[in-house]
Image (tube, rainbow, N blue to C red):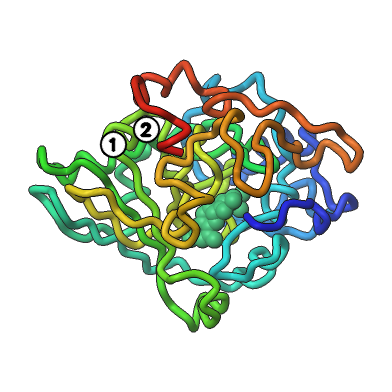
Amino acid sequence: MLIKKPSDVRPSEITSPEVYAKRREFLKAAAALGIGAVASGPAGALVKPSGSGTPIPNVIDTAYGDKLELTEYEHVTTYNNFYEFGTGKSQPAENAKDFKTRPWTVVVDGECEAPGEIGIEDILSSIPQEERIYRLRCVEAWSMVIPWVGFPLSSLLKRFKPTSKAKYVAFETLVDKERMPGQRRAVLDWPYREGLRMDEAMNPLAIFATGLYGELLPNQNGAPLRLVVPWKYGFKSIKSIVRISFTQTIPETTWWKLAPHEYGFYANVNPEVDHPRWSQASHRIIGAGLFSSKQPTLMFNGYAEQVADLYRGMDLAKFY
Ligand SMILES: Nc1nc2c(c(=O)[nH]1)N[C@H]1C(S)=C(S)[C@@H](COP(=O)(O)O)O[C@H]1N2
Ligand SMILES: [Mo]
């Protein structure tokens, strides 16, 4: 998130929306036939496959965000922030290639009546009717629109029966220096940690993503389970989650703790509150071309109608 120029996006390796549409058809067809691991569909001849290659069957396609123009698959999967696999934008795709996300267990603890552990297979198989495609804009110095496959946080969290003392929910990423080479350097205080206020977490726009573009999440995008909180800056959307804790007090979060004058706990997208080192009034659209002009950033990233009520009466310049 410190590096802002899309200098390592390779314009030669781009999938157009039309190719995406064909790719989805192909993935659906492949799923119906039960040929799971066919990699990249019609785009295969043109681009290096960098995704999981595993289609997700029976996802409910919704009209969610269908007016938004999607960012090309190749940008979504090669321009990433995932410091566990390196601090460069193109490093996660390269360094996470062989990352194994099975078996995978998420521990749930803290202020809840039914703490425990849940395996990723259990999560994936017990959510299917709720698994939907959400086309959401994610923004910071740049923006992308990604067709996530996911489900609301609330549908998983409520299973653990949070108590009335649970005011916040905290998330942690895996720590494993062997499997996550970026953790061999102390660039961040591992594990990567994030958190939400309970009412934020229960908003239907806060989702767990398990896939994108119709396939299981590519490793570099946070496999096998990550947050997507589209009205907040990108760093809130924590990847490769292994722990969820309900807490009474505000949890420490990675970037807030590292640079509290630059990053707050809330991190709501707000064009009127600048980062101390740069304006947050505008951003660049990834894939729109090197010479495209900057776009004005919208309050709550354009999701004000859904989330503004959560912050009524709060001074958003103070609680940034
Ligand atoms: N565990 C972990 N989660 C993370 C990060 C990270 O470095 N480690 N980077 C964050 C930042 S700064 C951003 S912008 C988004 C990027 O998500 P994307 O690569 O899927 O676009 O992931 C967020 N989640
Ligand atoms: Mo970021």
Q: Separation of disc 1 and disc 2 at Cα?
A: 8 Å
Residue at image mark 2: 130
Q: Residue at x 46, y 66 (%)?
A: 101
Q: Which mark is residue 197?
A: none
Q: Quadrant of the N terminus?
A: bottom right
- Circle 1 SS class: helix
Where residue 164 sits: x, y (%)?
A: 10, 38
Query: Mark 2 belongs to which amino acid?
Result: Glu
Residue 45 visible at all:
no
Among the two numbered marks 1 and 2 on one chain, the one whose residue lies closer to the N terminus: 2
Residue 314 visible at all:
yes
Q: Quadrant of residue 98?
A: bottom right
Where residue 90 sits: x, y (%)?
A: 72, 63
Query: Mark 1 belongs to which amino acid?
Result: Ser
1 or 2: mark nearer the eye: 1
- Direction from residue 67 to residue 242 in the image, left or right: left
